[in-house]
Image (cartoon, rainbow, N blue to C red):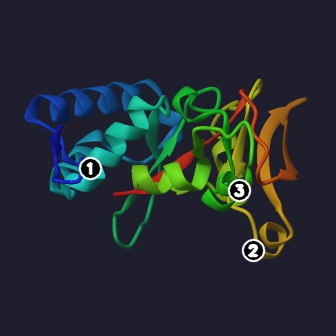
Amino acid sequence: MAKSGKGTVTKLSAGERQTLLDTLQSRFERFPSRHKGVAWKDVQARLEAAPASKLWSLSEMERTGGEPDVTGRDRKSGELTFTDCSPESPKGRRSCCFDPEALESRKENKPAISALGMARELGIELLSEAQYRELAKLGEFDTKTSSWVQTPPDIRRLGGALFCDRRYEHVFVYHNGAESYYASRGFRGALKV
């Protein structure tokens, strides 16, 4: 990976890019029910035309355990949505509080990251509750873990944040203090390409 002067990765090497494309194609072909009506050749063309930053973000989703896959396509623009489809909340994104403000508010036992802070670094968006519920229609996710989701400003202003999981064959949305963190709670993200 090439880095800028500030240490921020800006693009993948040719080998890293090909490895990423091979991984995405393999997953795409293994889970056809996630993207009915979408052909890999269209996905590949879109990825090859994408800015380097989008491929880097997909690579980071993969590196942190998200197992991104195509879960949607905008009919007008052709834009694809890649969503973290790992069975459980991505391993490289767990033990995080909700946002940088919550992280800053902790005086002791601070986690290393916040969900929103890391999502920004990765160039992805946290799933909304609606997106999480749509993802749940494509498979069983978070049966042992949970994932922070976008939280309405009025709830966050009062110190809370929302997370979702799947238990008893249903998706549940819960609340917790935004500064809380658990080894089994991380976050899922989405990226439009």
Question: Would residue 168 appear left or right of 166 to someone viewing this image?
Answer: right
Question: Would residue 97 appear left or right of 86 to someone viewing this image?
Answer: right
State the image quarter where residue 109 is shown: top right
Query: Which residue is pictured at 33% across the width and 24% down the height?
Result: 26
Please name the residue that numbered disc 2 is placed on.
153
Can you tell which mark lies on residue 8? Answer: 1
Residue type, label 3: Ala
**Closer to the camera: disc 2 or disc 1?**
1
Can you tell which mark lies on residue 102? Answer: 3
Using the numbered discs, state the Cα–Cα distance from disc 1 to disc 3 in whole angstroms: 24 Å
Residue type, label 2: Pro
The crowd level at tag 2 (other Cα within 10 Å; few <14, some 14-19, many 20+) is few
Q: Residue furthest right?
A: 168
Is disc 2 placed on a helix, strand or loop?
A: helix
The crowd level at tag 1 (other Cα within 10 Å; few <14, some 14-19, many 20+) is few
From the viewer's perspective, is residue 113 above or below residue 104? above
Upstream in the sequence, badge 2 or badge 3? 3
Residue type, label 1: Thr
Query: Which residue is pictured at 24% across the width and 34% down the height?
Result: 21
**Closer to the camera: disc 2 or disc 3?**
3
| Picture mark count | 3
Query: Which residue is pictured at 50% across the width and 34% down the height?
Result: 66
Q: Residue furthest front?
A: 107
The residue lying toward the viewer, choosing from 138 and 8, is 8
Q: Is residue 135 visible?
A: yes
